Amino acid sequence: MAFHFPKSNPEQSTTTADAGLADSPHHERPRGLMRWVLTTSHKEIGSLYLLFSLAMFFIGGIFALVVRAELFQPGLQLVEPEFFNQMTTMHGLIMVFGAVMPAFVGLANWMVPLQIGAPDMALPRLNNFSFWLLPVAFTLLLSTLFMPGGAPDFGWTFYAPLSTTYAPPSTTFFILSLHLAGISSILGAINIIATILNLRAPGMRMMDMPLFVWTWLITAFLLIAVMPVLAGVITMMLMDINFGTSFFNAAGGGDPVLFQHLFWFFGHPEVYILILPAFGIVSAIIPTFARKPLFGYASMVYATASIAILSFLVWAHHMFVVGLPLVAELFFMYTTMLIAVPTGVKVFNWITTLFRGSITFEPPMLFALAFVVLFTIGGFSGLMLAIAPADFQYHDTYFVVAHFHYVLVPGAVFAIMAAVYYWLPKWTGHYPHERLSQVHFWLSVIGVNLTFFPMHFSGLAGMPRRIPDYALQFADFNMVSSLGALLYGASQLVFVLVVIKCVRGGKKAPAKAWEGAEDLEWSVPSPAPLHTFETPPTFERPAH
Amino acid sequence: MWSVIKSVLAAFFGVQREQQRREDFENGRPVSFIVVGIAMAMLLVALVALVATLAAR
Amino acid sequence: MRTLLERVAAGLTLALISPLVLANGWNMPIGVTGLSREIHSLHMTIFWICVAIGVVVFGVMFYSLFRYRRSKGAKAANFHEHTGVEVLWTAVPLLILVAMAVPATATLKNMYDVSEAEIDVMVTGQQWRWRYEYLGEDIAFTSNMSTPREQISGEAEKTENYLLEVDEPLVLPVDTKVRLLLTADDVIHSWWVPELAVKQDAIPGFVNENWVRIDEPGIYRGQCTELCGMDHGFMPVVVEAMEKDDYESWLAERKEAAEQESMGIDREWELDELMERGEKVYGSICASCHQVDGSGSPPAFPALAGNTEMLDDVEWHIDTIVNGVSGSAMPAFRSTLNPVEIAAVVTYERNAWGNEAGDTVQPSEIVEMLEE
């Protein structure tokens, strides 16, 4: 693999570009459904990923609403505890692996080639394959709901032995489905790395790349590093369930804690996989609408790399109460505190970018600003959780639920929303409806905070997570959370409306849809034609 | 070599000057950054482990 | 019971009040042990640090958003780097964190110091109850949730300690260092009482240690905090802390009761007696999976009513309860139940819900079997 660190090689870029085009000759394009099944265009595959992610976002959202409806009042009203556990589990799995990850891959598909001036992804057919694995994987996962014994019910972290010896028979299907999703992620990551390293426009060096490209490059390396660990751990589960091994079965000499070490060695970098591309998106949007270059670009890149490395050294902070030795406890507390520093640096950089800018508040900017504020709140609770002795009180309570929903919903999901609003003009040629977008934004912000802020209190007051019924003192907090969840869920229908309206028509967008936007994608027409950068553009470095 | 170490340290700290970054990307070879980066990561682990061991006494 | 509307209104008001009103029920309890107070103060320290950072960061952010609006004619500057500022805002958080790490380390070391405990209690998690064994005292019992199912389903009014009440709490003396040894029989559970600031996973195949020294007599309630299956939400922990004298007399009472129970092993029991005892055991141990009416919830939990395999082979029936079924959710009750209880529950299962085996199983038979 050619690794051009300082300079890109123009000749190589053109040859690969031609090869990419040869895959999809204009006159032979299939029509109708087969067009989408066989497509190798990064734009069409990007759209498929995003639509798939949207569908999963709603399915996972419905599961969440079932959970919140049951928790609206104390007592069991709507579902049985078994089904409640299936809902929490499926909600987590669908949202993490089916909604957020594919959304970021979809955005990468659409935007990475456009931002680096490449005609397509480096491996277009592989790209098609890695997308179509996903509908298969998640159909398989959702089908477990209709199997005897029900769907997986052991939480999205599937701790053994609850997920092995004590699991429903459908667990084997869950393992297969996760394997497929994992293969899809690895192939997608390989493709993104190959594209970024080989297909940059002549003259664009690594350090000229937009931050979205940078963060995705680092994310892709994280994916390749940790997805095999996940594959390994679920294969060990498969062996324990079906072939009589005892990796995690204490009665057979196995070790249930080993499962948690392996899971979180995957799981913690996974958390950063879910958030680093969001950092890239926000780093594109804030300078655009502050009309001012991003403050500390070099520091941002370095901080991202630093987070990526540290993310491998903090996994056991999820395991402070499993009985680790004191030294391990201290080690992971210190590394966890360290990782807060580069994350803080990013927030400071965004805010300094705003300082002395010329700021306007278009829909993408609204979501990006909400991201900065609410993600930081999630960061604060993260900092509190890092204090190991205090974590003994926070662990596995609603305080943790509040924490990771703050970093994932108004964090990752808001960043995805911001990205969609930011790039919709490029995708459709129309601006999203301004007033409806604002309605979507404000309802989402109110809904998200009503849902997740009270969870801090119910957690501190003593409510454990993953329980279908609760003691009376938590009733008020839960009722607010449930109402907020309903509002947040319903307001996403407005989002769908905005997208449909935008595809159908609306105010026409020029090539450079946002006044302050700088990157290469704004040099191609809106909507972006099926083939862009067939001859590589010459990259001109911004004046700074 | 010293400048490579300095740049990697800056990366760990998360702050780098534009001027220095430009020099790195024009003159440095990627391999040396990666090797030094991995070595420094191991050093960091050792250092934190040492502090934790001492603190646990 | 307030009306729904009133509670919605109260809840919304609650959410709108500033989080700085940290009254009871909103925040981590201060608790009743030295450690819980230490942890609470760490929690408040880091909380106020976060608030301070938040005020500065969000202050600058909202000032910028307000002051530099283009609609007010703001012209963008073009600066994009300042190493001094960047070093400063990396170094300051680093120093704050180091300052935070020092007391946190001290507290953690304190939490890990289980030496010089006066009482050892073995805590075993089982789906879905806790078992307490006072090591060296020959006392052991299980602690089941005592909230009636009618309250959960809404057929009865929920009472004050809904879901947080048990038939037999863990009884501990105050001002005494108690070491807790935690393990589990089936899946991972986690034993938590917020007021005591003790939360520790109970893991099959492992024995974890933790300790507690309670300052004030009282009843302290908590729950299992590690998802452990269907009834994870119905597995409360209740600790009753007593003055030392009261504890001693409680201990003596328990010992006497245990002695009487062991005398029951040798005598012949009537069918009615066994059925009565068996119903109690079944209700607290078996009913959560196999249901009160013995209908089970197949395929995971087979029905016992009309179960011919069980009715035709009494030896197999007893063996299943004593040794469990490996690879399934059925645990071994060899050490959880005493011979009288095993005999009673077997007899009950064979003669309840229309099952008509008609035979009794005597405690002495179980003793014989256990000795083999």
Image: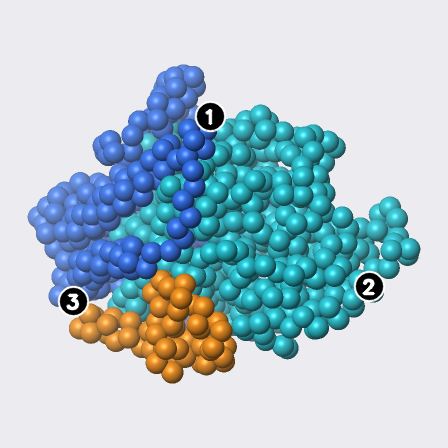
Chain colours: A cyan, B orange, C blue
Q: Residue at x 39, y 19 (%)?
A: C9
Q: Nearer the viewer, residue A280 or A521?
A: A521
Amino acid at pointer 2: Asp
Label 1 sits on a secondary structure element that is: loop
As drawn, A502 above or below A52: above
Return the residue at label 2: A23
Residue that numbered label 1 is attached to = C155
Give the image quarter of residue A423: top right
- Please identify, in this view, whether the residue under mark 3 or under mark 2 is nearer the observer: 2
Asked if badges 2 and 1 are on one and the same chain, I answer no
Visible residue check, residue C125: no
Q: Outermost residue toward the right?
A: A27
Tell which residue pokes out farthest to the left in this image: C245
Q: Say whether marks 1 and 3 touch (CB < 8 Å).
A: no
Which residue type carries mark 1? Glu
Q: Nearer the viewer, residue C22 or B21?
A: B21
Cα distance between the residues tagged 2 and 1: 66 Å
Are the residues under badges 1 and 3 in a single subunit? yes
Q: Which residue is mark 3?
A: C115
Q: Which residue is rendered at x = 16% and y = 45% of the image?
A: C32
Q: Earlier in the sequence, mark 1 or mark 3?
A: 3
Please rate how many residues cluster around mark 3, counting C-alpha atoms within 10 Å: few if below 14, some from 14 to 19, many from 20.
few
Residue at 40% x, 44% y is C77
Relative image position of residue C216 (x, y in whole percent): 12, 44
